[in-house]
Amino acid sequence: MSDRIKRLAVIGVGLIGGSLALALRKAGACGEVVGCGRSRENLERAVALGVIDRFEQEPGRAVAGADMVVLGVPLGAMEAVMGRIASSLAADAVVTDVGSAKMAVADAVRRTLGGHLARFVPGHPIAGTERSGVEAAFASLFEGCSVILTPLPETEAGALARVGAMWRACGAEVVEMDIAHHDQVLAATSHLPHLLAYTLVDTLARMDDSEEIFQYAAGGFRDFTRIASSDPVMWRDICLANREAIGEMLARFSNALQDLAEAVQGGDGETLLSLFHRAKAVRDRQIKGRTLSAED
Ligand code: NAP
């Protein structure tokens, strides 16, 4: 294929970076894959699992000669990594990231990769699991999922097309979105639910009889809280990177929760029933039966 990647550099060979490398190899859409991260053990495991061909622990060395560079690190590490690759990128290299919030990434790109803005394509695969590290990576992760690209005003059409082709080779559907809109939508659909899951588990854990409570936790509790097993560093970084949109969603949800508390405490069955009917109808129509991706 004409969009075939000759040398792919993946900085952050974890669930997302590792799965992308596996999917591209499976599709025959890339040649050599160079991985980069801090832990030698994770990178050696990535070679053993056939995720990458070789690795470098210095990001600048990892991107040398690569025509496609994917930043798969937590959001809090993005800017430092960008700073370390800036002077080593090939002039025609396309750079993209997979971070779960996009405004913070765009701001970091402007501060660090000014000379490469035209060839930077912010991206976010709406796929994942609550697991992390290269051991969690699998080739089919992105099949049938959406990948949102949020090009900068400076992003060249050719770079955008190459990143789109890369994700389509993994079986994903590619859509474009405005950066601020992406952050608002994801605050509602992904970031808020993760915070609710973490808070629910933490609230119960801090009750005196928490041991007994968890002993009787059934399927509903497990379904609702599975995502509270996600990586805490990643979620701290997402909250910090998308604090404005998440703050708005938390305020909106707090109001709704307050209304719910009043209805429960006031024995207002009519309000409760109509809320549950409304929510069930929306969920049945919008979500039930659709295959959902786990993270994001
Ligand atoms: P992950 O499995 O923990 O992988 C992150 C990788 O980055 C690790 O292999 C880690 O290896 C490496 N890393 C961390 N800090 C680094 C640094 N300072 N320099 C170089 N490498 C570093 O996490 P993930 O789930 O793949 O998430 C990665 C990115 O994808 C995040 O930005 C996240 O917002 C986004 N995302 C996640 C999901 C999801 O469901 N998990 C979905 C969509 C997007 P070392 O510790 O060895 O350095």
Image: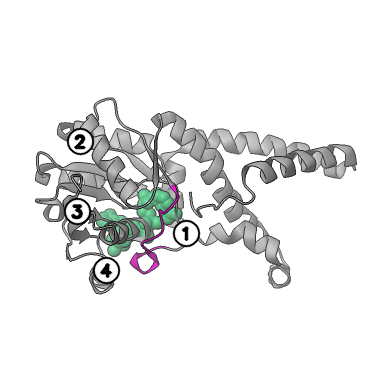
Q: Earlier in the sequence, mark 4 or mark 3?
A: 3
In what quadrant does ligand 1 lie? bottom left
Residue 41 location (% of width, % of height): 26, 72
Looking at numbered disc 3 in the image, what kind of residue is underneath it?
Leu
Tell me if I can see residue 150 in this picture: yes
Q: CA distance from mark 4 to mark 1?
A: 18 Å
Q: Which quarter of the picture shows residue 214?
A: bottom right
Looking at numbered disc 1 in the image, what kind of residue is underneath it?
Thr
Residue, x 66% and y 38% (percent of image)?
254
Residue 150 location (% of width, % of height): 35, 34
Label 4's element? helix
Residue, x 71% and y 67% (percent of image)?
218
Q: Is residue 139 covered in magenta?
A: yes
Tell me the number on the disc at residue 119. 2
Does mark 1's beta carbon lie closer than 8 Å to ligand 1?
yes
Looking at numbered disc 4 in the image, what kind of residue is underneath it?
Ala
Give the residue at the far top of this rendering: 153
- Magenta residues, start to end: 132-145
Q: Which residue is mark 3?
A: 8
Nearer the observer, 191 or 254: 191
Q: How many marks?
A: 4
Looking at numbered disc 2 in the image, what kind of residue is underneath it?
Arg
Instruction: Give the left or right position of residue 112, taking residue 204 as reference.
Output: left
Tell me the number on the disc at residue 129. 1
Q: Which residue is mark 4?
A: 46
Q: CA distance from mark 3 to mark 2?
A: 15 Å
Q: Residues within 10 Å of mark 3 (few under 14, many from 20)?
A: many
Q: Earlier in the sequence, mark 4 or mark 1?
A: 4
Q: CA distance from mark 1 to mark 2?
A: 29 Å
Q: Which quarter of the picture shows residue 174?
A: top left
